[in-house]
Image (cartoon, helix red, strand yellow):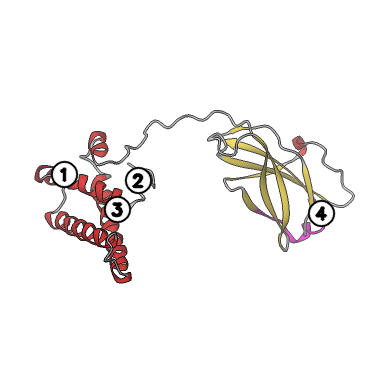
């Protein structure tokens, strides 16, 4: 079971509130049921008390640079212990979703929102990446780049020698590769140097393809 990476509050006071709630939830009964050793629980309590005390000092008129640094170190230790608890004890059975919510965490969504066929149109911007290499930058011509349907990109291309028949339609492209990156590199054989490569891209999602993007061309270095 996975949780959002931003499960930990950003403010120190809120981090203390979350940890305080954990100490309420982690009764002797739940600690036994969830397999949490007493030593680990005691360490969490001690780190919580230290962080709370130093935060009060750091927010008082008597604070000094030394106290500020001690407070920073105390919270770093507390956060590390909280992450340890989450990873070692809260991600495994016998916790149920109600337990997870009680701890102030978010249950894993086991029913992801289905994404439809991609509708965005993208094109390739090329740049020199190295000998016999062209960099590819995926640029959105239309559509929302954040759409969940845009899982990856099918890069179609065809290499044409000087004097060869130029490509006029993406349907004529005969080779392809798939990438999830918006920025990638195409590598060519030594003998392809000086030839023209024609490129067009389709957004792809589990085999479903979006519309063709504009056809572009570049000279292979």
Distance from disc 4 to disc 1, alpha carbons, whole Å, reads 70 Å
On-image quarter of the N terminus: top left
**Which residues, given as a range, are shown in magenta?**
185-196
Q: Is residue 195 magenta?
A: yes
Question: What is the residue that sits farthest to the front in this orientation?
Answer: 61
**What mark, if any, has residue 154 been given in the picture?**
none
Q: Residue at x 30, y 71 (%)?
A: 66
Of marks 3 and 4, the one in the foreground: 3
Q: Answer with the quarter of the image where residue 67 lies.
A: bottom left
Which residue position holds label 3?
Answer: 83
Residue 151 is left or right of residue 53, and the answer is: right
Q: Residue at x 30, y 41 (%)?
A: 105
Question: What is the residue that sits farthest to the bottom in this orientation?
Answer: 66
Q: Quick one: label 4 or label 1, which is nearer the N terminus?
A: 1
Distance from disc 3 to disc 1, alpha carbons, whole Å, reads 17 Å
Q: Nearer the viewer, residue 136 or 39?
A: 39
Counting from the top left corner in percent of width and height, residue 131 is at 72, 63
Which residue position holds label 4?
Answer: 195
């Amino acid at each position: 079971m996975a949780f959002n990476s931003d499960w930990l509050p950003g403010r120190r006071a809120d981090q203390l509130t979350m940890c305080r709630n954990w100490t309420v939830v982690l009764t002797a009964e739940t600690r036994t049921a969830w397999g949490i050793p007493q030593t680990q629980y005691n360490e969490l309590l001690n780190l919580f008390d230290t962080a709370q005390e130093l935060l009060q000092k750091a927010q008082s008129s008597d604070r000094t640079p030394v106290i500020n640094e001690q407070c920073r170190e105390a919270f770093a230790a507390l956060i590390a212990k909280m992450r340890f608890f989450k990873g070692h004890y809260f991600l495994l059975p016998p916790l149920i979703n109600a337990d997870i919510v009680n701890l102030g965490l978010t249950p894993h969504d086991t029913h992801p929102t289905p994404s439809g066929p991609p509708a965005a149109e993208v094109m390739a911007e090329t740049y020199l990446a190295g000998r016999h290499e062209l960099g590819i930058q995926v640029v959105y011509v239309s559509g929302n780049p954040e759409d969940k349907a845009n899982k990856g990109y099918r890069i179609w291309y065809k290499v044409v020698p000087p004097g060869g028949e130029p490509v006029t339609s993406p349907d004529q492209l005969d080779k392809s590769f798939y990438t999830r990156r918006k920025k990638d590199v195409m590598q060519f054989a030594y003998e392809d140097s000086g030839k023209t490569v024609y490129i067009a891209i389709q957004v792809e999602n589990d085999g479903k393809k979006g519309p063709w993007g504009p056809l572009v061309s570049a000279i292979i270095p």
